[in-house]
RNA sequence: GCGGGCGUGGCGGAAUCGGCAGACGCGCAGGACUUAGGAUCCUGUAGGGCAACCUGUAAGGGUUCAAAUCCCUUCGCCCGCACCA
C-alpha cells in the first residue's frame, strides 16, 4: 500500500489551487459574503508559530464557509513600514525597500507552504507608493476636517527607537516595541483628534457582541470617561480664574486646599518673588525629570508645597491655600484639583501629612461623622451637612443642584472628561509614510495638493542620523516649492506612525488596485464589516481602537456604511513550549518550516487546532504533533484500503438516506450524522476546533471498527453507505487538512476540488434512537444503568429501575419520596 | 486598590441549558504481528479497595432530587487599569 507522503501531496495541490485560482474572491451581490481576516504581519522574514496558529484558524473558517456556500474574502498583506527595515539599513547598509520586499517574498512562500487559501490578487503592501499615497490622502482628509493638527506638547520619547510614541504605545512606562524606558520631550508633533470620537468609541462598544468582553473592557478603561463638574475658583492674589474638574461637586463645601500640577501655568505667577520660589522651582525641576512610570505610580510619595497663593471657593467665599503637588497631572482634567480630605482617601492622607484642615460635609446615613475626628475618608454617598443651603440633600441630588447653582453664577458647569488623549502620529524615522505637508515662510503649513500625491519616500539616503528624521538629510526631499505661492519651502520630514497604515488596510482589500480613491464605496460596502477578525490581544487598545476611529470618521464622510470595522473578534492565545513563551534565548523555538519539513503542513495545522481552543494559550508538544500525524496516516490508510469501493461510483449518486438500515449500518449512519452536526456547530458557533477535530476522530474510529467487524460480503452490500460515510469524513476534514483531503478526493475518483464541494448536511431524523442507556440514580448516586426504549414513561422507567439487580438492594425497605426523570438521560429516585 | 478571567487524571484538554465527570489525543502498562520496531493493530488506564463500595473538578460552606457548572468565603495563578481628581 502506498504510504502517506505529505511533502509530495502538499506541493502538488498548492500548485493546483494556484493554477485554478481557487481562492479568488469577486464581489457578487447575488451571493452572501463572508469576510475572514487575520491581522496582517510585519514582514520580518520569519514565520513563527504564532503566525501559523492565527493563519490556521482563519483558514479553517475560510474553507469551511466556502463549502457552506458563502462568497468568502480571505486576503493577506504586509504591514511593511517600520523600524526593523530601517535598523537593518543602519546596521548592514541594505536598502529598506529591498530588505522588506525580500522578506515579503520569503514569508509569502512560507504561508503558501501552509496551504493557506488567500486571494493573492488582493495583496496589499503598505510600504508601496500605491498604498501609502492613500495614507497621505487620508491624512489630508483628517487635516481638512480639523482632525489632524500640530502642537507642541510634552510627548513620550523612546531613546532606543529615537522617536516619539503615542500614549497607547507606552506599556508600563516602556516602549511597546523595544521595552526601553520612555522619557518626556517637549516637541512639536502631529496629532489625530481621536478624542473627538471618544463618546462614540465608548458607546458603540455595546454593538460589538462578537468581541471578547475583556477587549471591550480594556477599551472602556482606556477611554476612561468620567462625568463630573468643572468648578471655577478665583485666585485671591491675582484675580485669575482657576478651574478644577471634580466627580464630586457635592463635596464642594469640604474643600480645604487646592493643588496644581507642577506644569500648571498659574504656578509661575503665584510663586514669582515669593520666599519659597527657589524651593518650588527645584521641586518642579525634579518632578519633571522623573519618568512617567514613577510619576504616575500610586506608590510614589505625595509631595506638596505651598505656593503662597489662595483660592476663593465660589460656594462659600472661603479662602484656601493653593499648593503645587507631584501627584497632580497636567494631562488630565484641568491640571488642578480641589482637596476634600474628608471624602477622598488620597486627600485625607495628604491633608494629615501636611496638617491641612479636614471638614466633613457628607454624613453617613449609618453613623454620624461630624463629632469625632475621622480615621479615614468617607467616600460613599450620604447626606450633605455644613453646606449652607444644600444641607439635607443626598449626594446625588447635590451633585446636580450645586453644579446648576454654580452654572447660574458663571462659576461652573457639568462636564465629561476622558483619559483618552489625542493620537500622536508623527515619527522621527525614515521608513514610513511621508506626511504630505509643506512649510512656507509666508503661507505656513500647506497641504500638498491631492494631484501631487504620493509624496515619494526618497531612496539612497545614508541612514545613520539619529534623533531626528533622516529625511532632513535629503535636500532633494526637504527643499521644495510652496504649493500655494511657489516660494522656497520645506517639507515636513517626519513620517506617519505605522498604526496609521493598519487602521484601514482591511478596507483596501475590498478594492486593492483602485487608483482613483482609497477604495470605492460599492466595493467596500459589499465586503465590510469584516465578519471575523483574528489576531493577538496585544492590539486591544492600539490597532483595534485606531481602526474603529478610522471607520467612524470615514462613515461620517459617507465613504463607508459600516459603523464598526470588525463584527466579531477572536483574540487567539499564545504558543508556548515547556511552559514558556518560545524564544531564542530559551532555546525552545519550533518553526513552522521544521514542522512542514518533518510532518507536513496538514499535520502542523491539525495539531495547532487540536491542542487547545483558539483563544487559550497553547503548549507545543512534539508528541502531540506525532499524534496528529498518526491520525492523518490512519485516515490515509482507511481510504487506501477501501478505494475499490469507489470504483465506478459517482459522488452522492445513491440516495442512501431514503434507504432503511438496521443494526450496525444504522449505527454507523447515525454516528456519521452526529459527527456532521457536532463538527458544524463547533466550527460555526463555538469556534472550538479542538472538539470538532475530536468528533472527526471519533467518526474515523467508528468507521474503522465497523469495517473490522463486518464481513467482506457486508462491505460489498453496503458499499454505498460506506462510501457516503467516507465522503463525509473527507469533507469534514478538508478545512483542517486541505492537502491530504484533496489527494484522497481525487484518488476516490472524483474531480474538481474537494474545497469546492458543499459542506455535508445532517438529518435530525437519523440522529434519533429507539433505545438508549439510562442512568439510575438513588439519592443522586448512580447505582445502575439500563437500556430502554426512549419513549418509556416515568412509571415504566421506575419499574425498570426496580427490576435492576444492582439497584434493587438500594430500594429495599425504603420509602420512595420522589422520582425525577430526565428524558434520555437518567432517573433519580429519592428514598428514605 | 479597582475591573475581568482562570483553577478538572501523569499531560493537553472534554462535559454546549443544573442531569452519568474525565470525550478526543498524548503518555504509560499489557498483548498481537515481526528478524527487528521508534511502524501498525488490540486491551487497559482518576485515586483507594479483593469486592460490594468509598473518595474525587483549588479549599471550605450553602442552594438543589441532582453542582466542575449557581451563591458566599478563602487561597493560588493570569490579564487589564491604577495618585484620573
Image (tube, coloured by chain):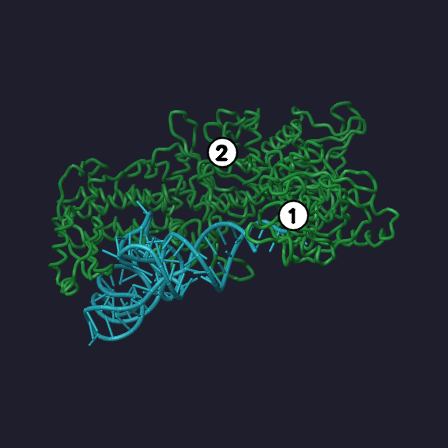
Chain colours: A green, B cyan
| Front residue of this view, candidates A749 and A775 | A775
Residue A21 relative to residue A702: left or right: right
Write down the residue under mark 1. Answer: A361
User: Does the residue at mark 2 contact the one at mark 1 (Cβ under 8 Å)?
Assistant: no
* Residue that appears at 37% across and 47% down: A688
Q: Work out how far the residue at label 2 is from the one at label 1, CA to CA, in angstroms.
A: 65 Å
Residue count near mark 1 (Cα–Cα under 10 Å), binned few <14, some 14–19, many ≥20: many
| Front residue of this view, candidates A593 and A269 | A269
A675 versus A132 height, above or below: below
A673 versus A515 height, above or below: below
Give residue A67's quadrant in the image: top left
Residue A385 in picture, x, y percent from top left: 64, 46
Q: Is residue A181 visible?
A: no
Residue A352 in picture, x, y percent from top left: 70, 58
Q: Nearer the viewer, mark 2 or mark 1?
A: 1
Helix, strand or loop under label 1: loop
Residue A374 relative to residue A593: left or right: right
Residue B71 in picture, x, y percent from top left: 41, 53
- Same-subunit check for callouts 2 and 1: yes
Name the chain letter of the residue that bears numbered label 1: A
Give residue A738's quadrant in the image: top left
Quarter holding the C terminus of chain A is bottom left
Write down the residue under mark 2. Answer: A122
Give residue A130's quadrant in the image: top right
Q: Is residue A362 visible?
A: yes
| Front residue of this view, candidates A276 and A318 | A318
Q: Earlier in the sequence, mark 2 or mark 1?
A: 2
Helix, strand or loop under label 2: helix
Residue count near mark 2 (Cα–Cα under 10 Å), binned few <14, some 14–19, many ≥20: many
Q: Which mark is residue A743?
A: none
* Residue that appears at 21% across and 58% down: A830
Amino acid at each position: 500500500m502506498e504510504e502517506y507522503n505529505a511533502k509530495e501531496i502538499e506541493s502538488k495541490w498548492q500548485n493546483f489551487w494556484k493554477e485554478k485560482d481557487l481562492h479568488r474572491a469577486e464581489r457578487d451581490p447575488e451571493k452572501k459574503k463572508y469576510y475572514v481576516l487575520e491581522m496582517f504581519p510585519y514582514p520580518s522574514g520569519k514565520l513563527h508559530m504564532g503566525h501559523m496558529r492565527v493563519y490556521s484558524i482563519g483558514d479553517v473558517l475560510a474553507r469551511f464557509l466556502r463549502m457552506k456556500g458563502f462568497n468568502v474574502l480571505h486576503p493577506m498583506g504586509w504591514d511593511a513600514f517600520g523600524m526593523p527595515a530601517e535598523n537593518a539599513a543602519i546596521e548592514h547598509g541594505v536598502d529598506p525597500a529591498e530588505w522588506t520586499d525580500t522578506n515579503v517574498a520569503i514569508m509569502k512562500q512560507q504561508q503558501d507552504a501552509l496551504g493557506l487559501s488567500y486571494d493573492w490578487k488582493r495583496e496589499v503592501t503598505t510600504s508601496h507608493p500605491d498604498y501609502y499615497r492613500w495614507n497621505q490622502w487620508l491624512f489630508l482628509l483628517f487635516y481638512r476636517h480639523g482632525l489632524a493638527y500640530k502642537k507642541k506638547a510634552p510627548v513620550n520619547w523612546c531613546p532606543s527607537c529615537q522617536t516619539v510614541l503615542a500614549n497607547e504605545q507606552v506599556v508600563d512606562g516602556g516602549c511597546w516595541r523595544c521595552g526601553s524606558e520612555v522619557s518626556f520631550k517637549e516637541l512639536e508633533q502631529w496629532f489625530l483628534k481621536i478624542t473627538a470620537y471618544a463618546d462614540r468609541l465608548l458607546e458603540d462598544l455595546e454593538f460589538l457582541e462578537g468581541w471578547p468582553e475583556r477587549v471591550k473592557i480594556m477599551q472602556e478603561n482606556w477611554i476612561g470617561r468620567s462625568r463630573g463638574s468643572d468648578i471655577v475658583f478665583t485666585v485671591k492674589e491675582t484675580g485669575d480664574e482657576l478651574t478644577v474638574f471634580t466627580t464630586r461637586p457635592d463635596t464642594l463645601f469640604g474643600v480645604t486646599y487646592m493643588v496644581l500640577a507642577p506644569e500648571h501655568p498659574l504656578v509661575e505667577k503665584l510663586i514669582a518673588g515669593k520666599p519659597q520660589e527657589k524651593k518650588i522651582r527645584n521641586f518642579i525641576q525634579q518632578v519633571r525629570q522623573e519618568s512617567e512610570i514613577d510619576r504616575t505610580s500610586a506608590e510614589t510619595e505625595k509631595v506638596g508645597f505651598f505656593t503662597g497663593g489662595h483660592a476663593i471657593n465660589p460656594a462659600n467665599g472661603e479662602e484656601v491655600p493653593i499648593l503645587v503637588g507631584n501627584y497632580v497631572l497636567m494631562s488630565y482634567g484641568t491640571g488642578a484639583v480641589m482637596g476634600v480630605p474628608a471624602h477622598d482617601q488620597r486627600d485625607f492622607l495628604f491633608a494629615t501629612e501636611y496638617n491641612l484642615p479636614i471638614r466633613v460635609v457628607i454624613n453617613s446615613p449609618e453613623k454620624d461623622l461630624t463629632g469625632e475626628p475621622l480615621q479615614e475618608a468617607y467616600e460613599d454617598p450620604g447626606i450633605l451637612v455644613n453646606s449652607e443651603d444644600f444641607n439635607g440633600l443626598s449626594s446625588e441630588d447635590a451633585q446636580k443642584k450645586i453644579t446648576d447653582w454654580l452654572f447660574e453664577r458663571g462659576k461652573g458647569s457639568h462636564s465629561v472628561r476622558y483619559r483618552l488623549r489625542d493620537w500622536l502620529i508623527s515619527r522621527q524615522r525614515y521608513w514610513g509614510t511621508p506626511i504630505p505637508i509643506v512649510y512656507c515662510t509666508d503661507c505656513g503649513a500647506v497641504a500638498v495638493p491631492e494631484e501631487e500625491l504620493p509624496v515619494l519616500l526618497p531612496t539612497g539616503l545614508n541612514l545613520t542620523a539619529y534623533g531626528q528624521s533622516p529625511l532632513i538629510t535629503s535636500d532633494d526631499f526637504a527643499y521644495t516649492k510652496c504649493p500655494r505661492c511657489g516660494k522656497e519651502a520645506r517639507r515636513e520630514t517626519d513620517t506617519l506612525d505605522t498604526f496609521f497604515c493598519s487602521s484601514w488596510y482591511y478596507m483596501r482589500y475590498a478594492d486593492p488596485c483602485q487608483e482613483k480613491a482609497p477604495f470605492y464605496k460599492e466595493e467596500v460596502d459589499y465586503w465590510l464589516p469584516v465578519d471575523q477578525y483574528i489576531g493577538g490581544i496585544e492590539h486591544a487598545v492600539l490597532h483595534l481602537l485606531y481602526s474603529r476611529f478610522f471607520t467612524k470618521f470615514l462613515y461620517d464622510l459617507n465613504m463607508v456604511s459600516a459603523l464598526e470595522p470588525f463584527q466579531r473578534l477572536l483574540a487567539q492565545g499564545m504558543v508556548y513550549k515547556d511552559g514558556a513563551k518560545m524564544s531564542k534565548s530559551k532555546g525552545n523555538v519550533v518553526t513552522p518550516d521544521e514542522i512542514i519539513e518533518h510532518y507536513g503542513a496538514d499535520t502542523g495545522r491539525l495539531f495547532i487546532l487540536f491542542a487547545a481552543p483558539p483563544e487559550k494559550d497553547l503548549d507545543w508538544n512534539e508528541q502531540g504533533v506525532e499524534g496528529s500525524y498518526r491520525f492523518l496516516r490512519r485516515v490515509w490508510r482507511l481510504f487506501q484500503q477501501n478505494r475499490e469501493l469507489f470504483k465506478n461510483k459517482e459522488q452522492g449518486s445513491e440516495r442512501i438516506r431514503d434507504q432503511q438500515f438496521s443494526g450496525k449500518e444504522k449505527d454507523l449512519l447515525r454516528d456519521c450524522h452526529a459527527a456532521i452536526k457536532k463538527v458544524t456547530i463547533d466550527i460555526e458557533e463555538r469556534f472550538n476546533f479542538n472538539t470538532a477535530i475530536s468528533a472527526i476522530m471519533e467518526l474515523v474510529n467508528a468507521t474503522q471498527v465497523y469495517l473490522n467487524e463486518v464481513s467482506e460480503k457486508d462491505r460489498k452490500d453496503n458499499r454505498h453507505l460506506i462510501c457516503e460515510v467516507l465522503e463525509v469524513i473527507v469533507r469534514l476534514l478538508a478545512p483542517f487538512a486541505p492537502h491530504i483531503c484533496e489527494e484522497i478526493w481525487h484518488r476516490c475518483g472524483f474531480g474538481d476540488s474537494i474545497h469546492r464541494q458543499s459542506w455535508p448536511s445532517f438529518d435530525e431524523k437519523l440522529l434519533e434512537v429507539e433505545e438508549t442507556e439510562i442512568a439510575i440514580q438513588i439519592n443522586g448516586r448512580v447505582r445502575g444503568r439500563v437500556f430502554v426504549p426512549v419513549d418509556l414513561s416515568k412509571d415504566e422507567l421506575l419499574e425498570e429501575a426496580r427490576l435492576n439487580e444492582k439497584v434493587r438492594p438500594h430500594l429495599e425497605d425504603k420509602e420512595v419520596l420522589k422520582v425525577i426523570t430526565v428524558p434520555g438521560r437518567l432517573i433519580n429516585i429519592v428514598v428514605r
